[in-house]
Amino acid sequence: MFQDMGVGVNVRNVSRIPGLQRADLVRSEAFIGGAWVGAESRILVDNPADGSVVGDVPNLGAAEAMDAVTAARDAMPGWQGLTGKARGEVLRRWSQLMLAHAEDLARIMTGEQGKPLTEARGEVAYAAGFLEWFAEEARRVNGHVLTPHAADKRLTVLRRPVGVVAAITPWNFPLAMITRKAGPALAVGCAMVLKPSELTPLSALALAKLAEEAGVPPGVFNVITGEAAPIGEVLTGDPRVRKFTFTGSTAVGKMLAARCMATVKRVSLELGGNAPFIVFDDADIEAAVDGAVASKFRNTGQTCVCANRFFVQTGIHDRFAAALAERVGGFRLGSGLTGEFDQGPLIDARAVAKVRAHIADAVEAGARILTGGQSAGGLFFEPTVLVDVKPDALVNREETFGPLAAITRFETESEAVRMANDTSAGLAAYVFTKDMSRSVRLSEALECGMVGLNTGLISTEIAPFGGIKESGMGREGSRYGLEDYLDLKLVCAEIDLE
Ligand code: SIN
C-alpha cells in the first residue's frame, strides 16, 4: 500500500512485529551505497493475515535508483579486486549472521508475507544456504587454457564478472529469491542493486542490515524500495547495469526482458510454472499424498514450482483424491505470528479472486469439490481438492498460485505425457511411480527444467533451479548458478618462439 504520510506523520521506528530479539532488524530506510536512505513518501507494509501494518519503507524513485547504480558501479572495482576467498569469507559471515538471527528473520517474513512460521524458518535456512554455497564457489571461478590453433599462439579463456547486476525479486520467498541471486553475483565480484517486492521489503532490508554487519563493502549490495515502474525503468534501461535478473510472473518478465535488449544486457528470468503432478497406478500412495501436500500447499500454493495440474491414473484416482482431501481438510489456518498453523493467508484480494475463479470455472464444467472451495475469511482460503476437472479447464491452463489441487483422470502413460506437456510453461514436473523404466522415460519426455521423481520437494542450493519454454532462462543455485554472472573473455597471445 502506498501512502504519502506527509510531514508530521511519523510511523517510523515502530516495531509492529512482536517477539523480536533485535527490533533494529525491522528497517524503515532503504540501503544505498552503504547509507540508510529515507523519504517522506512511505510505503506501508501489511500483514496479509490480519491487514495490520507491520512496517513502512521509503517510496523511492528513479533518482535514487540511479544513485544505487552509481554506488554499485563505484564499488565494483574494489570488490572485484579481492580474492575469491576473501569475498567468500564475507558471504560466509553473512550466511552465519542470517542463521544467528533466524528466528527474527522468520518472524519478520511471516509478518509481512503470511507464511506459517515453520515455513519461514525453513526459508531462512534455505536462503542462508545460497550464501554459504556461493561463499565456497567463490574460490572456484576458474578459466581455461586451450590447445592453440598455431604454434606461436596461446589461448586463454578468462571468466570475468559481468558487471553491475540489477535484481527484482518477488514477495513469495522474500529472502531466498534474493540470496539465490546475490550469492553468485557477489561471489564472482559483481555489485548488485536489488528492488524487492513492495509487499515484502522488510525481509530484504533486514538482509541488508546483516550484509552491513558481515562486512559487505558499501555499494556492493544496495536495496531500493519503492514503486516498481520508475525503479524498474532505471534497472532495465540504465546502460551501466550489465545484467538483469528477475523472478516473477511470465508477463512482467517478458516486458522487462524486452526493455533490457535496448542496452543488450545479460538477462536471466525465473518465471511462472504450470507444473504437472502425475500419479501412476503403481505409485506409493502415501508418498504421493506427502508429495502433493509439499508441492501444492507449500506457501499456500504460492510457489512457481507448485504442482498446478494433477493427472492421476484411473486405478489409483479415487484413493489418492480421497486421501489428499482428508489430509488437507485437516489443515489449521491462521496467522503465523499468533500460533502454529499449516497454512497462512494468500497475499492479496486478487489472489483470492483467482482461486475462486478457477474453482468456479472447473465446477461449472462438471468438477466436484472433495474438500474446501470457500473463502475462510479475510485473505484465507480453504485448502481445496477438485476431481473430474476437464483438461481444458482454466486451472489447467493458468497457474493458480493458491491452495487448489485440481485432479484430472488419465488412462495411459502417453496420454499423461501429452497433457503434461500441453502448456507454454516448463518449470517443474512431478511423477509418482515405482516403475524405474517409466521414471526414466518420463524424466526425459517431460518438457521442463526440473523433475521431482517420487518427491514433491526439489529445491536446494546444491541443484540448478530454472525452467525452459516460457518459464524462463538461466539457472540459479548450484555451480551452474555462477554462469549467469560471468562473461567469457578470450586472450589470444602471439608469442615469440625464439
Ligand atoms: C519460486 O517460487 O520461485 C521459488 C520456489 C523455490 O525456490 O522452491
Image (spheres, helix red, strand yellow):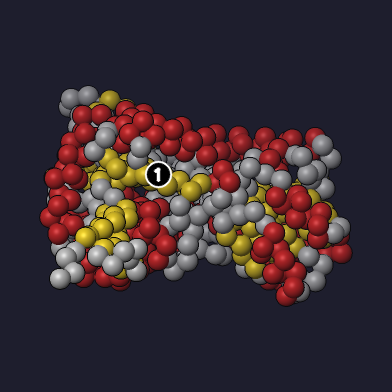
Q: Residues within 10 Å of mark 1 (few under 14, many from 20)?
A: many
Res 394 quadrant in image: top right
Q: Which image quarter holds the N terminus?
A: top left
Q: Residue at x 57, y 60 (%)?
A: 450
Q: Residue at x 22, y 60 (%)?
A: 493
**Residue 53 screen position, x and y as percent:** 36, 40
What amino acid is at disc 1? Val
Horizontal arrangement in the rendering, residue 79 relative to residue 270 (left or right): left
Horizontal arrangement in the rendering, residue 436 relative to residue 147 (left or right): right
**Residue 190 screen position, x and y as percent:** 25, 53
Residue bearing the label numbered 1: 267
Q: Is residue 71 visible?
A: yes
Q: Residue furthest front?
A: 498
Q: Judge by depth and name the residue closer to the eye, 13 or 399.
A: 399
Q: Judge by depth and name the residue closer to the eye, 283 or 480.
A: 480
Is 461 situated above or below 163?
below
Res 199 quadrant in image: top left
Q: Judge by depth and name the residue closer to the eye, 366 or 259.
A: 259
Assess mark 1: CB under 8 A from ligand 1?
no
Q: Judge by depth and name the residue closer to the eye, 333 or 166.
A: 166
Say what secondary structure mark 1 lies in.
strand
Q: How many numbered circles are shown?
A: 1
Q: Residue at x 18, y 25 (%)?
A: 7
